[in-house]
Image (cartoon, coloured by chain):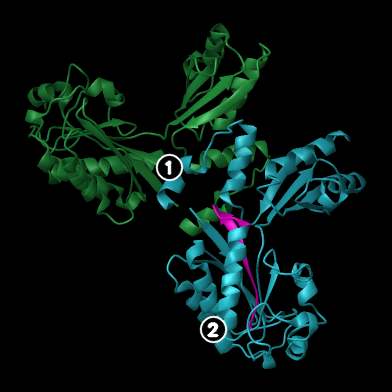
Chain colours: A cyan, B green
């Protein structure tokens, strides 16, 4: 079953009825399922997570953005979190049987519609970015360059949007993109030695010679009195969970340290769990659609 | 999500329109999903597999049985497979968040309705059996004691049904019950030595001192030129896949033999795969509802 996640961030974190109206618009598209709605009053920002087949994802996000443009006035918006627009950041994320490339296409399709149909300037970011300088969100919109600044700078130099007009209305500017699903994965060690913990984390992370799609840090857990290797797996298909686990085990073994336990924080795509079972059970031919529940839900 | 499987067997394996009519009745219940329909002309028998939440399972099975009683005349039925009635055997199987005990209750509820509302005698079997002698299907209905015999013997001695009348119409008798999900699991070894294969299979099976819910046999695979330990896991919750795998590995190790690969044949409940990942990744706190797809389908 083809499935994407979309996590639009809206610049309203206090007035629940505004957020509810936006969410209702998104949910009005058939086959869209709202997973989570979080309002943050200090940030004055809400984060909505929904999932759907890719075919209807653009329409659902579009309806949410259109409603946010109606209801949110950036001229009167205040909040701690940097923001560009009423619909601030909208990433598409592949979950099941969908490639990142397909999500990039969704981002561009949505950007085009938002620019042309509701006259909001759109910057494409992350894997949907059209230039290297827009890969990282922080290079586009940050504490020192937000709605108030882009209003003035839009269209000048590096501030030409990918879609939409060269002027900014009260709905502001939207940043639309695609990125991989991020698996938050921790391994706790039978050790209290943070020196060793830091060495293991270093051995794991991509930038220090570890696994290509791993970000890793070591923490000391006061409650469990143990060292934790806390990881973000930024591409679970290319660097699977089991490989991160086994690599921690290997690096810990040089100090005679055992793994106590591991944990996934939050959600994880089915395929990531199945791939671990395939590895450990040498069950290389196993297909996800052999799982009973997938037959019910296909 | 609560989910059961039901696998009714009907005494019609040639006339597809009859089977289609029965299946349509089953599928007419909301939230029922037909997984498989297989017709066997020699057996003159069809096996339907459907899944649903437990709340609607009895109604769906009931509609199928009622339609089969209308369309199938056991007086003119011929086929190789032993059979008692138009709806011959109907087991309920727990898949997800449902206990075997709940499936036993479904079987009894269905039995009562079939007996009282459509006047078909019902024998409860397997885990729903009310007496030890009805635990095994073969002890109730077999090659030498089928529709023709039960027609005469119904109500006499051991042949008093659990529900329904003491006489048999052209719809015959139905055998209704509950059993655990059966996982068909094979482990292939880097060995061609069948003597050793048989010893490993013996060490695995319950009746010879192995794992409590494992049936095991050794086979030689001509195509792969290797020994296969072929298992049925009759209670994957109590004897999980990983334990069967690790036990084969352990017993094989005394002969210096490595596992080549393993395979699940057919379908397997999600929980069985998740439990393997929990074990190998020491991810003991992991919950199935952390799997993204389960949120979509809940």
Residue name at image x 14 percent, y 44 percent: B116
Q: Are marks 1 and 2 in contact (CB under 8 Å)?
A: no
Comparing A55 with B98, the one in front is A55
Comparing B96 with B263, the one in front is B263
Span highlighted in magenta in the image: A86-100
Q: Chain of mark 2?
A: A
Q: Quadrant of residue B193?
A: top right
Q: Chain of mark 1?
A: B
Is A270 on the left or on the right of B149, as rendered? Answer: right
Where does the image place residue A213, in percent across and percent down from the top left? 75, 51
Element class at badge 2: helix
Where does the image place residue B291, in percent across and percent down from the top left? 57, 52
In this orientation, does residue B113 appear?
Answer: no
Where does the image place residue B46, in percent across and percent down from the top left? 24, 34
Element class at badge 1: strand
Residue A117, disc:
2
Residue A8 magenta-highlighted: no
Q: Is residue A164 above or below residue B195?
A: below
Instruction: Report the residue that reaches farthest toward the bottom.
Output: A75
Q: Is residue A83 above or below residue B45?
A: below
Residue A87 magenta-highlighted: yes
Q: Residues within 10 Å of mark 1 (few under 14, many from 20)?
A: many
Residue name at image x 20 percent, y 23 percent: B82
Q: Label 1 belongs to which residue? A: B95
Where does the image place residue A52, in percent across and percent down from the top left? 50, 63
Q: Please state which of the two labelled residues, at mark 1 or mark 2, is closer to the viewer.
A: 2
């Amino acid at each position: 079953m083809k499935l994407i996640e979309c996590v639009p961030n809206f610049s309203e974190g206090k007035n629940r009825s505004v957020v509810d109206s936006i969410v209702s618009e998104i949910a009005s598209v058939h086959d869209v399922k709202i997973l989570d709605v979080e309002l943050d009053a200090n940030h004055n920002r809400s984060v909505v997570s929904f999932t759907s087949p890719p075919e209807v994802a653009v329409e659902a996000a579009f309806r949410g953005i259109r409603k946010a443009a109606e209801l949110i006035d950036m001229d009167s918006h205040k909040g701690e979190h940097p923001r560009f627009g009423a619909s601030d950041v909208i990433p598409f994320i592949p979950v099941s049987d969908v490639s990142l490339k397909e999500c990039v296409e969704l981002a561009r399709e949505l950007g085009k519609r938002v620019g042309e149909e509701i006259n909001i300037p759109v910057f494409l970011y992350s894997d949907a970015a059209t230039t290297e300088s827009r890969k990282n969100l922080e290079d586009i919109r940050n504490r020192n360059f937000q709605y108030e600044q882009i209003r003035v700078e839009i269209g000048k130099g590096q501030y030409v949007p990918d879609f939409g007009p060269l002027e900014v209305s009260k709905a502001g500017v939207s940043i639309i993109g695609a990125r991989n699903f991020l698996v938050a994965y921790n391994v706790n060690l039978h050790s209290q030695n943070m020196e060793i913990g830091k060495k293991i984390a270093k051995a794991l992370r991509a930038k220090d010679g570890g696994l290509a799609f791993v970000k890793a840090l070591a923490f000391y857990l006061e409650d469990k009195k143990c060292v934790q290797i806390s990881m973000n797996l930024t591409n679970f298909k290319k660097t699977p969970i089991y490989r991160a686990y086994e690599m921690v085990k290997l690096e810990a073994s040089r100090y005679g340290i055992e793994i106590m336990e591991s944990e996934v924080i939050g959600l994880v795509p089915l395929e990531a769990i199945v791939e671990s079972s395939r590895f450990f059970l040498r069950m290389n031919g196993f297909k996800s659609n052999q799982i009973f529940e997938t037959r019910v839900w296909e």
